[in-house]
Amino acid sequence: MQFRNIFCTLALGQALMAQAVDWPQWRGPTRDGVLPAKGVALTTLPDQPKVLWKIKSGEGLASPVVAGGSVFLFENRNGNETMVALSAKDGSEQWATELSPVFEDGQGPRGPRCTPVIDGGQVFAQCSRGTLHSLDAKSGKVQWEIDYAKLGMKFVGEKGKVPGARRHGFTNTPLVVGGMVYATVGGKGHGIVCFNRTNGKVIWNALDYEPGYAPPVPSVLAGRQQFVCFFVEGVVGVDVRNGAELWKIPMKTDYGRHVAAPLSHKDMVVAGSHQVGLLGIQISRDGDNLSATTKWKNVEAQPNITHGVRVGDHYFGLGDPAKLVCVNIATGKTIWSDDSLSFPDPKRAMAAFIVMGENILSLSSGGELCLFSASPKGFTELGRTQVCGINWCMPAYVDGKLFVRDGIKKKGGNLICVDLTK
């Protein structure tokens, strides 16, 4: 019962949204790109945001996160994926801990690709080659670490036709709930693994699926608490108690490039990829059994490397070939699409979204911020400004301040803190 209460709180976001406005994990406190209720929601953007500080950062694609007055950045130092803690006030370094050798391929720089999670004084960092580390948030001291290879996962890299995270590195941020850490690992019987957060011991492991690039998403569907996991083999509902499969929608793409995190709303899961399209998956219940049916498919709204957000009954995301789309979740119909957002390379366009009440803040892969109305009536721009260079990272947003990382080429980039209220 204790686990049930903790999980339900996370899934619904009620307790988290009533607390402080830290941004302690990927896409914010509730992992869905939604600003907490007490956060500073924007109604416009300054023409030239005030830069509070700017420092050089090592190579990497992991997003910065903010908790307890510190910014946590995962970067390449000395050829190792290194967790760094910085002062959120001025960017000064507090500690740095090297964890695992870096990984490099043709998709990006040498460095970590998975955003860390900060929870209860612990930092959970997953390295590209498949290792999981727990560090003390104050000192950076390693508490425990796990090599997924010892659980049966064989990391291959950019060779042959091996699909998913074993090809381009682990980006699928672990999920921390209460005393447990959940990660999609891979290997026979280890598609998803539940670890004890205190010592890293395996509590349970299940499924033979291989990990894609999207993280596990906590959801309540058809009255059942579950994780929605986007594996190489497709979208799967997983029982929170033991990892058992509740339902599955197979999905096949070249190299298992399943990147965009699924989202759920009213017993519907919205998920998709660049080769399949955006799917609306209806979850139904018959007694103790759940089933899944693809209710609709929208090719125009097919996601690539951008994670969509939900406002009310509508999905907002980046469709093909780099258009902002608004989709009705119940019907799958595109309500409107707009090409006002600009990208340096439309074929590899990425936008990060933060829902701020009735508005959405977007950061394009070209470093441009755009604030627009989250309305199904059409695209209405409320402000636009340039804040950084080329990036593929979700920013962190705390009390009107945006923490953003740029630089997707070798030699690294910058970590920048800007005030969007001035």
Image: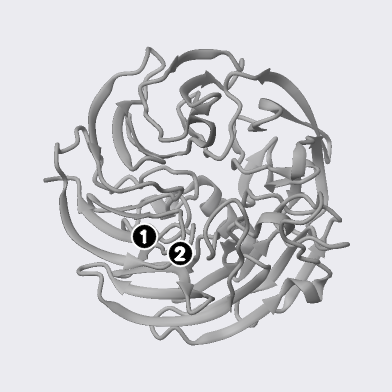
What is the C-alpha distance between the residues marked 2 and 1?
7 Å
At x 62%, y 65%, the residue is 128
The vertical placement of 390 against 71, above or below, is above
Image position, residue 392 (x, y; %): 46, 48
Q: Relative to 78, is 269 on the left or the right?
A: right
Which one is nearer the viewer's eye here, 85 or 322?
Answer: 322
Q: Relative to 361, is 53 on the left or the right?
A: left
Secondary structure beneath label 2 = loop
Q: Evaluate whether residue 200 shows in this view.
A: no
* Residue type marked 1: Gly
Which one is nearer the viewer's eye here, 407 or 213?
Answer: 407
Image position, residue 209 (x, y; %): 82, 52
Which one is nearer the viewer's eye here, 118 or 417?
Answer: 417
Image position, residue 358 (x, y; %): 32, 29
The residue that mark 2 highlights is 59
Marking on residue 218:
none
Question: Looking at the rendering, which quadrant does residue 265 occupy?
Answer: top right
Q: Evaluate whether residue 48 shows in this view.
A: yes
The residue that mark 1 highlights is 413
Quarter holding the N terminus is bottom right
Image position, residue 30 (x, y; %): 47, 50
Q: Relative to 392, is 185 on the left or the right?
A: right
Query: Alpha-carbon neighbours of circle 2 within 10 Å: few (<14), some, or many (≥20)?
Result: many
The vertical placement of 51 against 299, above or below, is below
At x 69%, y 43%, the residue is 257
The vertical placement of 420 against 150, above or below, is above
At x 37%, y 40%, the residue is 366
* Residue type marked 2: Glu
Secondary structure beneath label 1 = strand
At x 68%, y 68%, the residue is 130
Are the residues tagged 2 and 1 within 8 Å (C-beta)? yes
Query: Alpha-carbon neighbours of circle 1 within 10 Å: few (<14), some, or many (≥20)?
Result: many
